[in-house]
Image (tube, rainbow, N blue to C red):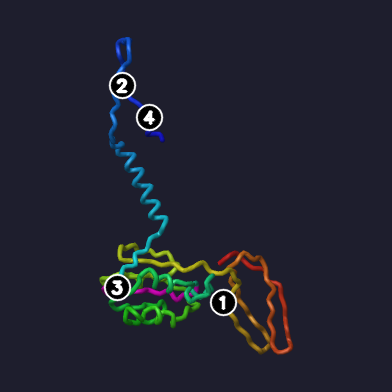
Amino acid sequence: MVYLWINRGRSAVVPFLRFWKGSATITRHRGWRRPPIFILLVLMALLLAIVAAAQPVWRGGSALTGDVSIVLDCGSTMARPGSNGKPFRGMIDRCETTLGPVGGKVSINPVPGQQVVVAGSAWAATARTMSPTLIATRLDQTVADQLRQTRGCVVVLSDQKLAISNSRIMQIVPDKPVPEVAIIRLAARSRPHPQVMIRLENRSLMKSIRLRVSSGDVKSDREVTLGSIG
């Protein structure tokens, strides 16, 4: 609109106005005139923004050739339940959809855990048999090792922020976890006096919670004040 308003007509300075008798012949020039380059750039940027907002995914008919390395985060943050109820908060399903068929071999590198190399068609089923742990993990060293040892794509399945930046890295994050209050440590002893120690981790907006410990017919309830999230 600004461009049309600015270029609504060209003005010219004349020394006088000539009047004449009879009808005047008006000649109109029609034709396409290329807009300025900045208008073209703005239109191109709008088109790219629309395409990016659609989040297109290429699903070609041919399988992904070459070997793929997957770094699977099996740390404590992956043990939290997701909104969809699936293992690893839906990361494996999302990765399977993004990669599509894989023609080569896939090396699955769980952290913590041992590397497993399987055929491209079996990697998702193999990853679903693995389980998260309660161990705090760091993936930077494993990702760096895979970049050094392989030449293909390195897929990282984690919600961690990596300190490594490389064009071969593809990171897929999980769904948001369900808010909860988790028991992360439990210890009990019977001597010299029966005693139970419980450590909680607040992963919700709750400020307090009622905790009940029972053994046989004996029950003990206590109101526990929770700390901040995390």
As helix, strand or loop, the secondary structure at mark 4 comes to helix
Q: Name the residue under label 2.
A: 26
Residue 126 placement, left or right of 167: right
Name the disc covering residue 184, or none.
1
Name the disc covering residue 113, or none.
none
First reached walking from the N terminus: tag 3 or tag 2: 2
First reached walking from the N terminus: tag 2 or tag 4: 4
Question: With respect to residue 203, does 49 lie above or below?
Answer: above
Q: How crowded is mark 3: few (under 14 residues within 10 Å), some or many (20 or more)?
A: some
Residue type at mark 1 is Ile
First reached walking from the N terminus: tag 4 or tag 1: 4
CA gap, disc 3 and disc 4: 53 Å
Name the disc covering residue 6, or none.
4
Q: Name the residue under label 3.
A: 63
Residue type at mark 2 is Ile
CA gap, disc 1 and disc 3: 42 Å
